[in-house]
Amino acid sequence: MDRRSIIKHAGIASVLAAGVAPAVHAQAAVRWRLASSFPKPLDTIYGGAEVFANAVKAMSGGKFEISVHAGGELMPAMGVADGVQQGSVEMCHTVPYYFYGKNPAFALGSAIPFGMNSRQMNAWMMHGNGRKLMDEFYAGYGMLSFAGGNTGTQMGGWYRKEIKSVADLKGLKMRLGGGLVGEVMTKLGVVPQSLPGGEIYQALEKGTIDAAEWVGPYDDQKLGFNKVAPHYYYPGWWEGGPEVDFFVNQKAYDALSAENKAIIQAASSHAAVDMLAKYDARNPVALKQLIGAKIKLLPFTKDVLDASFKASQEVYAANDAKSPEWKKIYADFRAFQRDQVAWFRVAEGRFDSYMQTVKL
């Protein structure tokens, strides 16, 4: 044995004899990958995963690290749930309604047309049956969920032409976020287009689509939609309070220590609160800037909203007939929402409506 080999083996022996722990720590360290459905420039919705990963690392003292990968980096933006289910990645950050095509019940974990606002959704998930019912459903895909954010009520999107009535929707090629709202819009004559966030601007600029919705003023301004479509409508009745979720592979989660499971829970709660707060803080400023840039800010007319509501109920009845999972969760969702709407009509609604009439 040569001199270098003797030194090497002596060094290892001395470490083992001394009971020093670096090797043990290296084995105990956890390294996960997270696939996002969102483009990296959006510090709000994509940034939610980074807020989460940073919190996990800080709370674990660096022993649990999660690398965050933007939509399309490891897999297609709309394929991240498949990645988690198959174990290609341990977790993803996404909007559940993206996977409506697998089963309509996915949409109930995020947002449905004329559904709950962000506070109501949070209440259902945390103190109603929401998380329990959704995780029972996700178990069939080898996943469980944690809240990963909310955008608050979204805008109704950018249009090349004004939408004065339901008739103006006929034949309109529009980028929409999920299959559910696509089914509703189809009943109104819209031709739905499914595109990830990073591809919307070019499609709108080239005229491949006539309209597009994403989130709200802050994100929409960053993506530049006001440069290619001047009419900005509200509200986004299909996303009153869309929850963004972390999907976690069940086997990977089960392999974690109790401490790391608690860290996942705490970090996700932090990221969820942070995302909504960011949107609430940044949307007002961005909207003022967009108005200053001479966009046309317009409300959907009542007849458009009424027609959309009617079409939504027709789709929900069809889903009840074809998906037992949808039917079970939707019944609970609506029962909870009825009480929420009744309550919000009293103190919250009256306070908000008054404050919107006074000069501060």
Image (cartoon, helix red, strand yellow):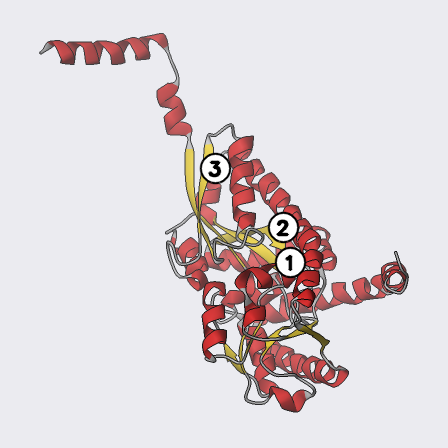
Question: In this view of the protein, can residue 171 be seen by the observer?
Answer: yes
- What residue sits 65% from the left and 65% below the top? 290
Q: Nearer the viewer, residue 19 or 98?
A: 98
- What residue sits 65% from the left and 67% below the top? 293
Q: Amino acid at mark 1?
A: Thr
Q: Amino acid at mark 2?
A: Met
Closer to the chain start, of discs 2 and 3, is 3
Q: Which element carries disc 2, helix, strand or loop?
A: helix
Q: Nearer the viewer, residue 139 or 356?
A: 356
Marks 1 and 2 in Cβ contact (< 8 Å): yes
Closer to the chain start, of discs 1 and 2, is 1
Residue bearing mark 2: 275
Where is residue 56? Give x, y as percent.
Answer: 53, 37
**CA separation in Å, label 2 and label 3:** 26 Å
**In the image, which is nearer the foreground, mark 2 or mark 3?**
2
Residue bearing mark 1: 151
Closer to the chain start, of discs 1 and 3, is 1
Q: Amino acid at mark 3?
A: Leu
Q: Which mark is residue 256?
A: 3
